[in-house]
């Protein structure tokens, strides 16, 4: 039987998921986290109560609940509970696609999401399936839990769009039907010859109204967002061994020289940001012990 879809319904997530290509791995209580420099880490409390601490942020949890710890580069998360107090299932989510960093950035801050149905019936259904499956060993359990982890992540993204007030900027944009049409179109065809006029027409808005609405919601201009997406696409093409000419064609740059300049500017900016982070993290020099107060 073919799957019926509503062709008039705007699919806010498929193009983003295809561009990010999430790779989800489920881990038990005692398994170490796989080494990674980017992505997301999620904790699903299946049973009991616990406290979690991430830096100065400490929360009390009661199952069933999802704790989004953010990027692995953020302060480590401490689970303040024994195995007798709580059962956990952990998810490591990496991204193989160029839109991955853009999606991961939406979860930079820790989040706590109740899965009892009070916030999202869909999350309750998926978590209920995972809880029941994790209760006892069954045939095909690893495969089922892997698929359930993928469904859980999609349900989580839907939840973010349904609650834009607590979500990242991208999800707030996807929650707005007008901006969502533009974001979906850009992710589906990042190399298309987009202009401010064509983007505004896609949104069904005037140029000025669209530019202001986009900037207010996503905290960057449409041009900056498109440039960021195209640069990520070009970087991946280069990393896959494609030449600058082919990478430029795939990502919408006018020429290989234009792409080369964009890559150079991006590398210089990243170097400046890294230097500032190191300077901010460096300890203050000790005061000279021979100095006397005036």
Image (cartoon, helix red, strand yellow):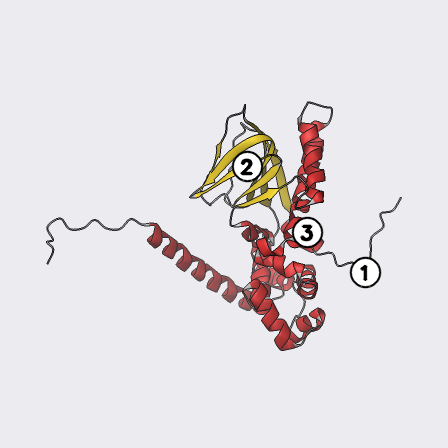
In the picture, which quadrant includes the C terminus? bottom left
Q: Which quadrant of the figure has residue 195?
A: bottom right
Mark 1 and mark 2 lie on one chain; the one further toward the N terminus is 1
Q: Nearer the viewer, mark 1 or mark 2?
A: 2
Q: Report if residue 220 is visible in the image.
A: yes
Q: Residue 139 or 119: which is nearer the viewer?
A: 119
In the rendered structure, the answer to whether residue 51 lies left or right of residue 123 reads left
Tell me the residue that label 2 is attached to: 61
> What's the distance in space between the residues labelled 3 and 2, CA to CA?
33 Å
Q: Residue 87 or 207: which is nearer the viewer?
A: 87
Q: Which of marks 3 and 2 is in front?
A: 2
* Residue under the image location 82 percent in, 58 percent down: 7
Tell me the residue that label 1 is attached to: 8
Tell me the residue that label 3 is attached to: 18
Mark 3 and mark 2 lie on one chain; the one further toward the N terminus is 3
Q: Which of marks 1 and 3 is in front?
A: 1
- Give the percent coordinates (x, y) of residue 290: 10, 50
Q: Residue 192 or 50: which is nearer the viewer?
A: 50
User: Which element type, helix, strand or loop, lies under badge 1?
Assistant: loop
In the picture, which quadrant includes the N terminus? top right
Quick check: 272 above or below 127? below
User: Which element type, helix, strand or loop, lies under badge 2?
Assistant: strand
- Give the percent coordinates (x, y) of residue 118: 66, 44
* Residue under the image location 44 percent in, 58 percent down: 270
Q: Which quadrant of the figure has residue 273?
A: bottom left
* Residue under the image location 67 percent in, 31 percent down: 131
The 10 Å Cα crowd at callout 2, few under 14, some 14 to 19, many 20 or more, is some
């Amino acid at each position: 039987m073919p799957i019926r879809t509503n062709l008039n319904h705007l699919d806010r997530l498929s193009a983003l998921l295809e561009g990010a290509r999430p790779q989800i791995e489920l881990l038990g209580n005692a398994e170490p986290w796989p080494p990674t420099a980017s992505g997301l880490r999620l904790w699903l409390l299946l049973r009991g109560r616990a406290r979690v601490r991430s830096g100065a942020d400490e929360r009390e949890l009661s199952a069933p609940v999802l704790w989004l710890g953010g990027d692995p580069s953020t302060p480590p998360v401490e689970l303040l509970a024994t195995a007798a107090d709580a059962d956990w299932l952990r998810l490591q989510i990496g991204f193989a696609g160029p839109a991955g960093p853009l999606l991961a950035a939406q979860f930079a801050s820790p989040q706590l999401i109740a899965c009892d149905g009070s916030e999202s019936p869909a999350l309750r259904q998926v978590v209920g399936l995972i809880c029941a499956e994790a209760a006892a060993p069954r045939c095909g359990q690893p495969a089922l839990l892997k698929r359930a982890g993928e469904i859980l992540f999609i349900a989580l993204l839907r939840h973010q769009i349904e609650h834009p007030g607590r979500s990242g900027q991208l999800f707030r944009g996807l929650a707005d039907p007008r901006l969502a049409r533009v974001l979906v179109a850009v992710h589906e065809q990042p190399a298309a010859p987009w202009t401010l006029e064509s983007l505004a027409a896609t949104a069904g808005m005037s140029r000025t109204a669209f530019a202001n609405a986009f900037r207010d919601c996503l905290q960057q201009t449409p041009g900056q967002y498109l440039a960021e997406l195209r640069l990520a696409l070009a970087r991946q093409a280069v990393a896959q061994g494609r030449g600058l000419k082919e990478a430029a064609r795939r990502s919408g740059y006018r020429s290989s020289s234009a792409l080369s300049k964009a890559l150079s500017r991006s590398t210089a900016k990243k170097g400046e940001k890294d230097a500032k982070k190191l300077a901010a993290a460096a300890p203050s020099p000790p005061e000279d012990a021979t100095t006397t107060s005036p």
